[in-house]
Image: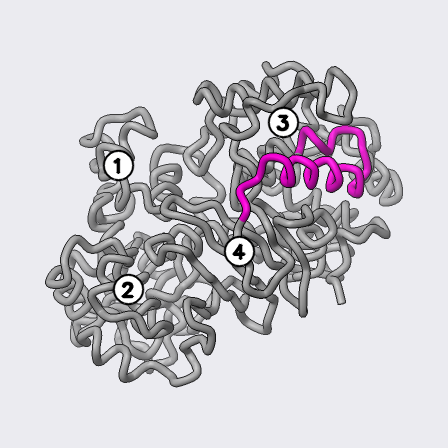
Protein backbone atom coordinates (compact mmCIF):
# COMPACT_ATOMS: atom_id res chain seq x y z
CA UNK A 1 0.00 0.00 0.00
CA UNK A 2 2.90 2.40 0.68
CA UNK A 3 3.38 2.89 -3.08
CA UNK A 4 -0.11 4.42 -3.45
CA UNK A 5 0.89 7.92 -2.37
CA UNK A 6 -2.52 9.51 -2.85
CA UNK A 7 -4.28 6.89 -0.73
CA UNK A 8 -1.62 7.12 1.99
CA UNK A 9 -1.93 10.90 2.14
CA UNK A 10 -5.71 10.64 2.54
CA UNK A 11 -5.29 8.13 5.36
CA UNK A 12 -2.81 10.39 7.17
CA UNK A 13 -4.91 13.52 6.75
CA UNK A 14 -7.99 11.73 8.10
CA UNK A 15 -5.94 10.08 10.91
CA UNK A 16 -7.47 6.73 9.96
CA UNK A 17 -6.42 4.14 12.56
CA UNK A 18 -7.47 1.30 10.25
CA UNK A 19 -4.21 1.77 8.36
CA UNK A 20 -1.90 1.59 11.39
CA UNK A 21 0.59 -1.17 10.61
CA UNK A 22 -0.18 -1.12 6.88
CA UNK A 23 2.42 1.59 6.25
CA UNK A 24 4.44 4.26 8.08
CA UNK A 25 4.76 7.97 7.34
CA UNK A 26 8.26 9.45 7.38
CA UNK A 27 8.39 13.24 7.65
CA UNK A 28 11.30 14.79 5.76
CA UNK A 29 11.32 18.07 7.69
CA UNK A 30 11.46 16.54 11.18
CA UNK A 31 13.25 13.23 10.58
CA UNK A 32 10.58 11.23 12.43
CA UNK A 33 8.22 8.47 11.33
CA UNK A 34 4.63 8.05 12.50
CA UNK A 35 1.64 5.79 12.27
CA UNK A 36 -1.15 7.06 9.95
CA UNK A 37 -3.37 7.95 12.92
CA UNK A 38 -0.77 10.18 14.62
CA UNK A 39 -2.69 12.91 16.51
CA UNK A 40 -0.18 15.61 15.53
CA UNK A 41 -1.02 18.10 12.78
CA UNK A 42 -0.39 16.24 9.48
CA UNK A 43 2.61 17.51 7.52
CA UNK A 44 2.28 18.85 4.00
CA UNK A 45 2.06 16.04 1.42
CA UNK A 46 5.35 17.11 -0.19
CA UNK A 47 7.11 16.50 3.12
CA UNK A 48 5.81 12.92 3.46
CA UNK A 49 7.38 9.70 2.23
CA UNK A 50 5.88 6.30 2.95
CA UNK A 51 7.54 3.06 3.98
CA UNK A 52 6.13 -0.46 4.35
CA UNK A 53 7.78 -1.18 7.71
CA UNK A 54 9.24 0.50 10.77
CA UNK A 55 12.55 -1.18 9.93
CA UNK A 56 12.60 0.54 6.52
CA UNK A 57 12.02 3.91 8.23
CA UNK A 58 14.86 3.26 10.63
CA UNK A 59 17.19 2.20 7.84
CA UNK A 60 16.36 5.45 6.03
CA UNK A 61 17.49 7.40 9.11
CA UNK A 62 14.13 8.31 10.66
CA UNK A 63 13.37 7.99 14.37
CA UNK A 64 10.08 6.99 16.00
CA UNK A 65 7.52 9.65 16.88
CA UNK A 66 7.30 10.17 20.65
CA UNK A 67 3.63 11.12 20.44
CA UNK A 68 1.97 8.35 18.40
CA UNK A 69 4.57 5.64 19.21
CA UNK A 70 4.46 3.75 15.90
CA UNK A 71 6.22 0.80 17.54
CA UNK A 72 2.93 -0.02 19.29
CA UNK A 73 0.89 -0.31 16.07
CA UNK A 74 -0.87 -3.59 15.27
CA UNK A 75 1.02 -5.79 12.82
CA UNK A 76 0.27 -5.71 9.14
CA UNK A 77 -2.74 -7.88 8.27
CA UNK A 78 -0.94 -8.93 5.09
CA UNK A 79 0.94 -11.66 6.96
CA UNK A 80 -2.37 -13.18 8.12
CA UNK A 81 -3.79 -13.43 4.61
CA UNK A 82 -0.82 -14.66 2.64
CA UNK A 83 1.17 -17.90 2.67
CA UNK A 84 4.00 -16.90 0.33
CA UNK A 85 7.69 -16.66 1.23
CA UNK A 86 7.58 -13.07 2.53
CA UNK A 87 4.53 -13.69 4.74
CA UNK A 88 5.97 -16.90 6.18
CA UNK A 89 9.30 -15.16 6.82
CA UNK A 90 7.56 -12.30 8.63
CA UNK A 91 5.67 -14.71 10.87
CA UNK A 92 8.92 -16.47 11.77
CA UNK A 93 10.72 -13.19 12.44
CA UNK A 94 7.86 -12.19 14.76
CA UNK A 95 8.35 -15.54 16.51
CA UNK A 96 11.98 -14.65 17.22
CA UNK A 97 13.63 -17.12 14.85
CA UNK A 98 16.27 -14.66 13.57
CA UNK A 99 17.30 -13.78 17.13
CA UNK A 100 17.63 -17.45 18.10
CA UNK A 101 18.86 -19.05 14.88
CA UNK A 102 20.09 -16.22 12.68
CA UNK A 103 19.25 -15.58 9.05
CA UNK A 104 20.66 -18.99 8.10
CA UNK A 105 18.20 -20.62 10.48
CA UNK A 106 15.36 -18.61 8.96
CA UNK A 107 16.42 -19.72 5.49
CA UNK A 108 16.71 -23.36 6.54
CA UNK A 109 13.16 -23.34 7.93
CA UNK A 110 11.77 -21.82 4.74
CA UNK A 111 13.81 -23.93 2.32
CA UNK A 112 15.29 -20.95 0.46
CA UNK A 113 18.75 -19.39 0.27
CA UNK A 114 19.56 -16.46 2.54
CA UNK A 115 20.19 -14.34 -0.53
CA UNK A 116 16.75 -15.03 -1.97
CA UNK A 117 15.01 -14.27 1.33
CA UNK A 118 16.91 -11.01 1.77
CA UNK A 119 16.13 -9.99 -1.82
CA UNK A 120 12.38 -10.59 -1.47
CA UNK A 121 12.11 -8.90 1.94
CA UNK A 122 14.03 -5.88 0.69
CA UNK A 123 11.85 -5.63 -2.41
CA UNK A 124 8.58 -5.70 -0.45
CA UNK A 125 9.43 -4.27 2.98
CA UNK A 126 12.44 -2.10 2.30
CA UNK A 127 14.49 -3.97 4.90
CA UNK A 128 16.20 -7.32 5.22
CA UNK A 129 15.65 -9.93 7.96
CA UNK A 130 18.37 -8.52 10.22
CA UNK A 131 16.90 -5.00 10.09
CA UNK A 132 13.39 -6.33 10.70
CA UNK A 133 14.60 -8.35 13.68
CA UNK A 134 16.49 -5.31 14.98
CA UNK A 135 13.32 -3.20 14.87
CA UNK A 136 11.52 -5.92 16.78
CA UNK A 137 14.28 -6.02 19.41
CA UNK A 138 13.91 -2.27 19.84
CA UNK A 139 10.17 -2.64 20.47
CA UNK A 140 10.79 -5.41 23.00
CA UNK A 141 13.46 -3.35 24.74
CA UNK A 142 11.10 -0.40 25.09
CA UNK A 143 8.44 -2.65 26.62
CA UNK A 144 10.88 -4.04 29.18
CA UNK A 145 12.31 -0.61 29.97
CA UNK A 146 8.89 0.93 30.54
CA UNK A 147 7.02 -1.93 32.22
CA UNK A 148 9.64 -3.62 34.42
CA UNK A 149 12.30 -2.69 36.95
CA UNK A 150 14.93 -4.94 35.34
CA UNK A 151 18.45 -3.54 35.25
CA UNK A 152 19.32 -2.17 31.81
CA UNK A 153 21.91 -4.88 31.20
CA UNK A 154 19.25 -7.54 31.79
CA UNK A 155 16.85 -5.67 29.49
CA UNK A 156 19.49 -5.62 26.75
CA UNK A 157 20.07 -9.36 26.72
CA UNK A 158 16.41 -10.22 27.30
CA UNK A 159 15.53 -8.15 24.22
CA UNK A 160 17.93 -10.14 22.08
CA UNK A 161 20.83 -7.68 21.87
CA UNK A 162 24.33 -9.12 21.94
CA UNK A 163 25.78 -6.29 24.02
CA UNK A 164 24.71 -3.41 26.23
CA UNK A 165 26.44 -0.96 23.90
CA UNK A 166 24.42 -2.14 20.89
CA UNK A 167 21.27 -1.94 22.99
CA UNK A 168 22.01 1.66 24.05
CA UNK A 169 22.93 2.76 20.53
CA UNK A 170 19.84 1.18 18.96
CA UNK A 171 17.42 2.64 21.50
CA UNK A 172 18.89 6.12 21.06
CA UNK A 173 18.79 5.81 17.28
CA UNK A 174 15.21 4.51 17.08
CA UNK A 175 13.54 6.52 19.85
CA UNK A 176 15.86 9.56 20.17
CA UNK A 177 16.02 8.84 23.90
CA UNK A 178 18.37 6.83 26.06
CA UNK A 179 17.00 3.75 27.86
CA UNK A 180 17.14 5.65 31.17
CA UNK A 181 15.18 8.54 29.68
CA UNK A 182 12.55 6.13 28.36
CA UNK A 183 12.11 4.70 31.84
CA UNK A 184 11.87 8.14 33.42
CA UNK A 185 9.22 9.27 30.93
CA UNK A 186 7.12 6.10 31.25
CA UNK A 187 3.75 6.45 33.07
CA UNK A 188 4.01 5.38 36.68
CA UNK A 189 1.10 2.94 36.30
CA UNK A 190 2.81 1.09 33.44
CA UNK A 191 4.86 -1.18 35.68
CA UNK A 192 3.24 -4.22 37.24
CA UNK A 193 2.91 -4.35 40.99
CA UNK A 194 3.82 -8.05 41.02
CA UNK A 195 7.54 -8.92 40.78
CA UNK A 196 8.33 -10.80 37.59
CA UNK A 197 5.01 -9.95 35.94
CA UNK A 198 4.95 -7.77 32.82
CA UNK A 199 1.76 -5.81 32.17
CA UNK A 200 1.07 -4.39 28.73
CA UNK A 201 -1.64 -3.54 26.24
CA UNK A 202 -2.08 -5.44 22.99
CA UNK A 203 -3.48 -3.13 20.30
CA UNK A 204 -5.88 -4.24 17.58
CA UNK A 205 -7.84 -2.81 14.67
CA UNK A 206 -11.38 -1.95 15.65
CA UNK A 207 -13.97 -3.32 15.78
CA UNK A 208 -13.34 -6.43 17.84
CA UNK A 209 -16.22 -8.57 19.10
CA UNK A 210 -14.86 -10.55 22.08
CA UNK A 211 -17.80 -12.87 22.83
CA UNK A 212 -17.03 -15.78 20.52
CA UNK A 213 -13.28 -15.19 20.73
CA UNK A 214 -12.94 -15.52 24.50
CA UNK A 215 -16.05 -17.68 24.77
CA UNK A 216 -14.51 -20.32 22.53
CA UNK A 217 -11.22 -20.34 24.44
CA UNK A 218 -12.97 -20.53 27.81
CA UNK A 219 -15.51 -23.20 26.79
CA UNK A 220 -12.82 -25.50 25.39
CA UNK A 221 -10.21 -24.80 28.09
CA UNK A 222 -8.20 -27.83 29.20
CA UNK A 223 -8.07 -28.05 33.01
CA UNK A 224 -4.58 -27.42 34.32
CA UNK A 225 -3.48 -25.68 31.11
CA UNK A 226 -6.21 -23.05 30.65
CA UNK A 227 -8.86 -21.35 32.72
CA UNK A 228 -11.22 -18.36 32.83
CA UNK A 229 -10.74 -16.35 36.01
CA UNK A 230 -11.78 -12.84 37.06
CA UNK A 231 -12.72 -11.79 33.55
CA UNK A 232 -9.51 -13.05 31.94
CA UNK A 233 -8.44 -16.07 29.94
CA UNK A 234 -5.33 -17.60 31.52
CA UNK A 235 -3.08 -20.32 30.17
CA UNK A 236 0.43 -21.74 30.32
CA UNK A 237 2.89 -21.20 27.48
CA UNK A 238 5.71 -23.45 26.25
CA UNK A 239 8.41 -21.05 25.05
CA UNK A 240 11.92 -21.41 23.55
CA UNK A 241 13.84 -20.51 26.72
CA UNK A 242 11.37 -21.66 29.36
CA UNK A 243 7.68 -21.34 30.13
CA UNK A 244 5.20 -18.63 30.94
CA UNK A 245 1.70 -17.89 32.18
CA UNK A 246 -0.42 -15.28 30.45
CA UNK A 247 -3.72 -13.63 31.37
CA UNK A 248 -5.66 -11.91 28.57
CA UNK A 249 -8.74 -9.76 29.11
CA UNK A 250 -10.79 -7.69 26.64
CA UNK A 251 -10.84 -3.96 27.29
CA UNK A 252 -12.15 -1.01 25.28
CA UNK A 253 -9.55 -0.33 22.60
CA UNK A 254 -7.01 -2.98 23.66
CA UNK A 255 -6.43 -6.40 25.21
CA UNK A 256 -4.99 -6.29 28.72
CA UNK A 257 -2.10 -8.72 28.98
CA UNK A 258 -0.20 -9.93 32.04
CA UNK A 259 2.81 -12.15 31.40
CA UNK A 260 4.85 -14.09 33.93
CA UNK A 261 7.93 -15.57 32.22
CA UNK A 262 10.56 -17.90 33.58
CA UNK A 263 13.03 -16.23 31.17
CA UNK A 264 12.50 -12.63 29.96
CA UNK A 265 14.13 -13.48 26.63
CA UNK A 266 10.81 -15.09 25.71
CA UNK A 267 8.88 -11.80 25.84
CA UNK A 268 8.87 -11.17 22.07
CA UNK A 269 7.76 -14.73 21.30
CA UNK A 270 5.08 -14.68 24.00
CA UNK A 271 3.58 -11.44 22.68
CA UNK A 272 3.63 -12.71 19.11
CA UNK A 273 1.86 -15.93 20.07
CA UNK A 274 -0.76 -14.12 22.13
CA UNK A 275 -1.50 -11.85 19.19
CA UNK A 276 -1.89 -14.88 16.93
CA UNK A 277 -4.09 -16.59 19.52
CA UNK A 278 -6.55 -13.68 19.50
CA UNK A 279 -6.14 -12.84 15.79
CA UNK A 280 -5.32 -9.24 16.72
CA UNK A 281 -3.62 -8.30 13.45
CA UNK A 282 -6.73 -9.03 11.35
CA UNK A 283 -8.38 -6.34 9.23
CA UNK A 284 -12.03 -6.61 10.38
CA UNK A 285 -13.24 -3.83 8.08
CA UNK A 286 -12.08 -5.71 4.99
CA UNK A 287 -13.45 -9.01 6.29
CA UNK A 288 -16.86 -7.66 7.23
CA UNK A 289 -17.22 -5.66 4.02
CA UNK A 290 -16.73 -8.82 1.96
CA UNK A 291 -19.09 -10.97 4.06
CA UNK A 292 -21.73 -8.24 4.33
CA UNK A 293 -22.12 -8.36 0.56
CA UNK A 294 -23.98 -11.68 0.99
CA UNK A 295 -27.58 -10.90 2.03
CA UNK A 296 -27.67 -14.04 4.18
CA UNK A 297 -24.64 -13.01 6.23
CA UNK A 298 -25.25 -9.26 6.33
CA UNK A 299 -27.57 -9.34 9.39
CA UNK A 300 -25.04 -11.46 11.31
CA UNK A 301 -22.20 -9.08 10.50
CA UNK A 302 -24.24 -5.99 11.34
CA UNK A 303 -25.29 -7.50 14.67
CA UNK A 304 -21.74 -8.21 15.88
CA UNK A 305 -19.04 -6.81 13.58
CA UNK A 306 -15.41 -7.60 14.16
CA UNK A 307 -15.52 -11.31 14.97
CA UNK A 308 -12.09 -12.91 15.09
CA UNK A 309 -10.94 -16.50 14.61
CA UNK A 310 -9.84 -18.01 17.96
CA UNK A 311 -6.46 -19.54 17.23
CA UNK A 312 -3.70 -21.16 19.28
CA UNK A 313 -0.31 -20.52 20.87
CA UNK A 314 0.97 -23.99 19.93
CA UNK A 315 0.16 -25.58 16.57
CA UNK A 316 1.12 -29.13 17.59
CA UNK A 317 -0.99 -28.86 20.74
CA UNK A 318 -4.02 -27.82 18.74
CA UNK A 319 -3.56 -30.67 16.25
CA UNK A 320 -3.58 -33.18 19.11
CA UNK A 321 -6.69 -31.56 20.60
CA UNK A 322 -8.43 -31.59 17.20
CA UNK A 323 -7.98 -35.36 17.03
CA UNK A 324 -9.22 -35.75 20.60
CA UNK A 325 -12.30 -33.73 19.61
CA UNK A 326 -13.28 -35.87 16.63
CA UNK A 327 -16.95 -36.88 16.87
CA UNK A 328 -17.23 -36.12 20.60
CA UNK A 329 -18.69 -33.27 22.64
CA UNK A 330 -16.67 -30.30 23.85
CA UNK A 331 -16.79 -31.66 27.41
CA UNK A 332 -15.52 -35.08 26.32
CA UNK A 333 -12.67 -33.53 24.35
CA UNK A 334 -11.64 -31.51 27.42
CA UNK A 335 -11.70 -34.67 29.54
CA UNK A 336 -9.46 -36.59 27.12
CA UNK A 337 -7.03 -33.67 26.91
CA UNK A 338 -6.93 -33.25 30.70
CA UNK A 339 -5.95 -36.92 31.09
CA UNK A 340 -3.05 -36.46 28.68
CA UNK A 341 -1.96 -33.34 30.55
CA UNK A 342 -2.03 -35.04 33.93
CA UNK A 343 -0.13 -38.09 32.68
CA UNK A 344 2.42 -36.48 30.35
CA UNK A 345 2.43 -32.68 30.84
CA UNK A 346 5.28 -30.76 32.43
CA UNK A 347 4.33 -29.39 35.88
CA UNK A 348 4.60 -25.63 36.39
CA UNK A 349 4.17 -23.40 39.40
CA UNK A 350 1.32 -20.89 39.19
CA UNK A 351 1.48 -18.33 42.00
CA UNK A 352 -2.24 -17.63 41.53
CA UNK A 353 -3.18 -21.33 41.52
CA UNK A 354 -5.39 -23.04 38.98
CA UNK A 355 -2.81 -23.77 36.28
CA UNK A 356 -0.63 -26.80 36.86
CA UNK A 357 0.94 -28.04 33.61
CA UNK A 358 2.25 -27.27 30.17
CA UNK A 359 0.42 -29.20 27.48
CA UNK A 360 2.67 -32.19 26.62
CA UNK A 361 4.93 -31.77 23.60
CA UNK A 362 4.80 -34.36 20.77
CA UNK A 363 8.08 -35.85 22.03
CA UNK A 364 6.44 -36.48 25.40
CA UNK A 365 3.39 -38.07 23.80
CA UNK A 366 5.25 -40.22 21.28
CA UNK A 367 5.96 -42.89 23.91
CA UNK A 368 2.42 -43.09 25.33
CA UNK A 369 0.70 -46.48 25.51
CA UNK A 370 -2.24 -46.52 23.04
CA UNK A 371 -4.13 -48.93 25.27
CA UNK A 372 -4.18 -46.29 28.00
CA UNK A 373 -6.31 -44.01 25.81
CA UNK A 374 -10.04 -44.27 26.51
CA UNK A 375 -11.12 -43.86 22.90
CA UNK A 376 -11.92 -46.03 19.87
CA UNK A 377 -9.03 -47.98 18.36
CA UNK A 378 -9.06 -46.05 15.08
CA UNK A 379 -8.75 -42.74 16.89
CA UNK A 380 -5.90 -44.11 18.99
CA UNK A 381 -4.09 -44.94 15.75
CA UNK A 382 -4.79 -41.47 14.43
CA UNK A 383 -3.42 -39.82 17.57
CA UNK A 384 -0.31 -41.97 17.90
CA UNK A 385 0.52 -41.56 14.21
CA UNK A 386 0.14 -37.79 14.46
CA UNK A 387 2.36 -37.38 17.52
CA UNK A 388 4.98 -39.73 16.09
CA UNK A 389 5.14 -37.76 12.82
CA UNK A 390 5.36 -34.49 14.76
CA UNK A 391 8.05 -35.81 17.10
CA UNK A 392 10.13 -37.19 14.21
CA UNK A 393 9.90 -33.92 12.31
CA UNK A 394 8.22 -35.57 9.31
CA UNK A 395 5.25 -33.25 9.84
CA UNK A 396 5.85 -29.63 10.81
CA UNK A 397 3.13 -27.32 12.03
CA UNK A 398 4.11 -23.74 12.66
CA UNK A 399 4.00 -20.12 11.63
CA UNK A 400 6.06 -21.01 8.56
CA UNK A 401 3.75 -23.78 7.34
CA UNK A 402 2.67 -23.70 3.72
CA UNK A 403 -1.11 -23.99 4.05
CA UNK A 404 -1.97 -26.15 0.99
CA UNK A 405 1.04 -28.44 1.45
CA UNK A 406 0.39 -28.94 5.17
CA UNK A 407 -3.30 -29.61 4.59
CA UNK A 408 -2.39 -32.30 2.03
CA UNK A 409 0.10 -33.83 4.49
CA UNK A 410 -2.58 -33.96 7.20
CA UNK A 411 -5.13 -35.58 4.89
CA UNK A 412 -2.58 -38.30 4.14
CA UNK A 413 -2.56 -39.38 7.81
CA UNK A 414 -4.88 -42.21 8.88
CA UNK A 415 -8.12 -40.96 10.40
CA UNK A 416 -7.74 -37.42 9.05
CA UNK A 417 -10.71 -36.18 7.08
CA UNK A 418 -11.49 -32.73 5.66
CA UNK A 419 -13.00 -31.45 8.95
CA UNK A 420 -9.91 -32.23 11.03
CA UNK A 421 -7.48 -30.92 8.42
CA UNK A 422 -9.47 -27.73 7.87
CA UNK A 423 -10.02 -26.93 11.54
CA UNK A 424 -6.24 -27.25 12.06
CA UNK A 425 -5.66 -25.03 9.02
CA UNK A 426 -8.11 -22.46 10.37
CA UNK A 427 -7.15 -22.31 14.03
CA UNK A 428 -3.55 -23.59 14.18
CA UNK A 429 -2.02 -22.51 10.87
CA UNK A 430 -4.03 -19.29 10.57
CA UNK A 431 -5.45 -19.82 7.07
CA UNK A 432 -8.19 -17.14 6.81
CA UNK A 433 -9.89 -19.03 4.00
CA UNK A 434 -10.17 -22.43 5.70
CA UNK A 435 -13.76 -23.65 5.54
CA UNK A 436 -15.74 -26.37 7.37
CA UNK A 437 -18.69 -27.32 5.11
CA UNK A 438 -19.11 -30.69 6.86
CA UNK A 439 -19.27 -29.19 10.37
CA UNK A 440 -22.64 -29.83 11.98
CA UNK A 441 -22.90 -26.34 13.46
CA UNK A 442 -22.06 -24.70 10.14
CA UNK A 443 -24.59 -26.82 8.25
CA UNK A 444 -27.31 -26.19 10.82
CA UNK A 445 -26.70 -22.43 10.68
CA UNK A 446 -26.66 -22.47 6.88
CA UNK A 447 -30.01 -24.23 6.76
CA UNK A 448 -31.55 -21.74 9.21
CA UNK A 449 -30.34 -18.85 7.05
CA UNK A 450 -31.70 -20.35 3.84
CA UNK A 451 -28.23 -21.25 2.56
CA UNK A 452 -27.44 -24.66 1.02
CA UNK A 453 -26.78 -27.17 3.78
CA UNK A 454 -25.07 -29.95 1.83
CA UNK A 455 -21.26 -29.67 1.89
CA UNK A 456 -20.77 -29.42 -1.86
CA UNK A 457 -23.53 -26.87 -2.43
CA UNK A 458 -22.44 -24.80 0.58
CA UNK A 459 -18.84 -24.80 -0.64
CA UNK A 460 -20.01 -23.49 -4.00
CA UNK A 461 -22.04 -20.72 -2.36
CA UNK A 462 -19.15 -19.85 -0.03
CA UNK A 463 -16.85 -19.08 -2.97
CA UNK A 464 -18.17 -15.51 -2.77
CA UNK A 465 -16.83 -15.24 0.81
CA UNK A 466 -13.22 -15.91 -0.17
CA UNK A 467 -10.61 -15.23 1.10
CA UNK A 468 -12.43 -14.86 4.45
CA UNK A 469 -14.33 -18.14 4.79
CA UNK A 470 -12.81 -18.86 8.21
CA UNK A 471 -14.46 -15.67 9.47
CA UNK A 472 -17.75 -16.68 7.85
CA UNK A 473 -17.55 -19.86 9.95
CA UNK A 474 -17.37 -17.71 13.09
CA UNK A 475 -20.51 -15.80 12.10
CA UNK A 476 -22.33 -19.04 11.28
CA UNK A 477 -21.29 -20.70 14.54
CA UNK A 478 -22.49 -17.63 16.43
CA UNK A 479 -26.11 -18.35 15.47
CA UNK A 480 -26.11 -21.40 17.76
CA UNK A 481 -26.90 -21.35 21.48
CA UNK A 482 -23.56 -22.74 22.64
CA UNK A 483 -21.15 -21.65 25.39
CA UNK A 484 -18.42 -20.95 22.80
CA UNK A 485 -20.46 -17.92 21.67
CA UNK A 486 -20.84 -16.33 25.10
CA UNK A 487 -18.31 -14.20 26.93
CA UNK A 488 -18.04 -15.85 30.36
CA UNK A 489 -19.21 -13.86 33.37
Q: In this view, does 43 lie above or below 59?
A: below
When asked about the image quadrant of residue 324, the answer is top right
Gap in angstroms between the C-alphas marked 2 and 3: 38 Å
Kindly check if marks 1 and 3 are in contact, taking CB atoms under 8 A apart as contact: no
Tell whether 278 sits left or right of 76.
right
- What residue is shown with label 3? 421
Range drawn in magenta: 322-347
Q: In this view, does 446 lie to the left or right of 3?
A: right
Q: For mark 2, does the 10 Å Cα neighbourhood hold few (<14), some (14 to 19), or many (20 or more) residues? A: many
Q: In this view, does 332 lie above or below 254?
A: above
Q: Does the magenta stretch include residue 323?
A: yes
- What residue would you read off at disc 1? 120
CA distance separating discs 4 and 2: 27 Å
Q: Do the residues labelled 4 and 3 touch (CB within 8 Å)?
A: no
Specify which label sits upstream in the sequence, 2 or 1: 1
**Disc nearer the start of the sequence (1/4):** 1
Instruction: Write the residue at 67% across / 51% down.
Output: 217
Query: N-terminal of the two: label 4 or label 3?
Result: 4
Amino acid sequence: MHTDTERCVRAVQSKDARFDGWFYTAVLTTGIYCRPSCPAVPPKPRHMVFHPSAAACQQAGFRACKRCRPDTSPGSPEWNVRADLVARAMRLIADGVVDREGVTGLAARLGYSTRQIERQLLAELGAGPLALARAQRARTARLLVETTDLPMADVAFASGFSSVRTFNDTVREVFALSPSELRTRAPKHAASGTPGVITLRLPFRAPLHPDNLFGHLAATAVPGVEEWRDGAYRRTLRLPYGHGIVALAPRPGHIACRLALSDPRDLTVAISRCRRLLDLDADPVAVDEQLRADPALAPLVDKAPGRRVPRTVDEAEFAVRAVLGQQVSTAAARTHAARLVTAHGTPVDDPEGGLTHLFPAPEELAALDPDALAMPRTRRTTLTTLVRRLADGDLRLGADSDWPETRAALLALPGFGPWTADVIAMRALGDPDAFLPTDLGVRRAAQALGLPSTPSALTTRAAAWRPWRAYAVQYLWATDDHPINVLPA
